Amino acid sequence: MFLEIIVFLIVSIILSSVGIGGGIFYVPIFLFLGYDFESASTLSLFLITITGFSAFLRFRKAKMVDWQLALVLETFTDIGAFAGGAMSSRFHPHFLQLLLGVLLLLAAYFTVKPKKESQGTFVRKTGFGWWNRHFNGYDYSISLPLVVPATFTLGYLAGLLGIAGGVFKIPMMILWFGIPAKIAVATSALMVSFTGLLGFGGHVMHTTPDWKLALILGVVVFIGGQIGSRISLKLPEKKVKWVLSVILGIIAVYMIVKPFV
């Protein structure tokens, strides 16, 4: 148990510093410890809820969480997460691991992919469905017709795979909508806690988690979330993106290779 505590503390610190709930590490760790994919996903979602909420508390104090953006993005994400959690037992574990690995590789690439457009003056987008935001000194535009299907799909995949979706939502917010990385990370911390909770609810409909282990590790990742969020607030914008991308790439390779070894 001591080893598990140290590992989950370190992981929660690293991943909360880049706005990820931790599922991309939590699931592989539980698999390595001998848990089946369904049990690993269920426990992961519980810990994600705790980690995300812990990090959110710190980001809220720094006034980096765009509450209105979180509400819009998270509504359809949570519906998808519950549906994905409820459907997870119908898919073969190896398929889910490979799917997770491929999605993580894509997320790693797009997180650091250079933007083609100019980084100069913000151009307010007009027309049907565009929501222009001004928050904490930044301006960005969100396409609401795109947000609904995108966030539902991301939520479904998150609940299905036992993660919280921050790994997908952060690149989406940065690349599609031009949201600054630090605001995306902070807002994601709030969203992943809700996504994790709804995904966990879907899983417990057909899986009974190890509550003793879940509660002990829950305390550990809460502490890790507090530490990691403090680190995130001090990191430069580009470093946040590159740290996130490297972490995603490493885990993606592990998840793709694991079913064959």
Image: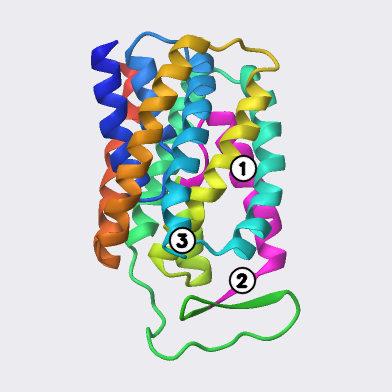
Q: Establish if 259 lies above or below 122.
A: above
Q: What residue type is labelled 1?
A: Gly
**What range is drawn magenta here?**
140-166
Can residue 241 be seen here? The reply is: no
Foreground tag (1 vs 3): 3
Residue 237: name its quadrant: bottom left
Disc 2, disc 1: CB below 8 Å?
no
Residue indicated by mark 2: 142
Q: How crowded is mark 2: few (under 14 residues within 10 Å), some or many (20 or more)?
A: some
Identify the residue position indicated by label 3 in the image: 184
**Is the residue marked by circle 1 packed among few (<14), some (14-19), or many (20+) residues within 10 Å?**
many
The answer for how far apart the CA atoms under marks 1 and 3 are is: 16 Å
Task: Give the residue at mark 1.
Answer: 155
The part of the image, by quadrant, that contains residue 38 is: top right
Q: Which is more N-terminal, label 3 or label 2?
A: 2
The kind of secondary structure the magenta stretch mainly shows is: helix
Relative to 112, does residue 180 appear above or below in the rendering? below
For the residues labelled 2 and 1, the Cα–Cα distance comes to 18 Å
**Amino acid marked by disc 3:** Ala
x then y, percent, for residue 26: 39, 27
Give the residue at x 38% y 17%: 30
| Residue 85 visible from this viewpoint | yes
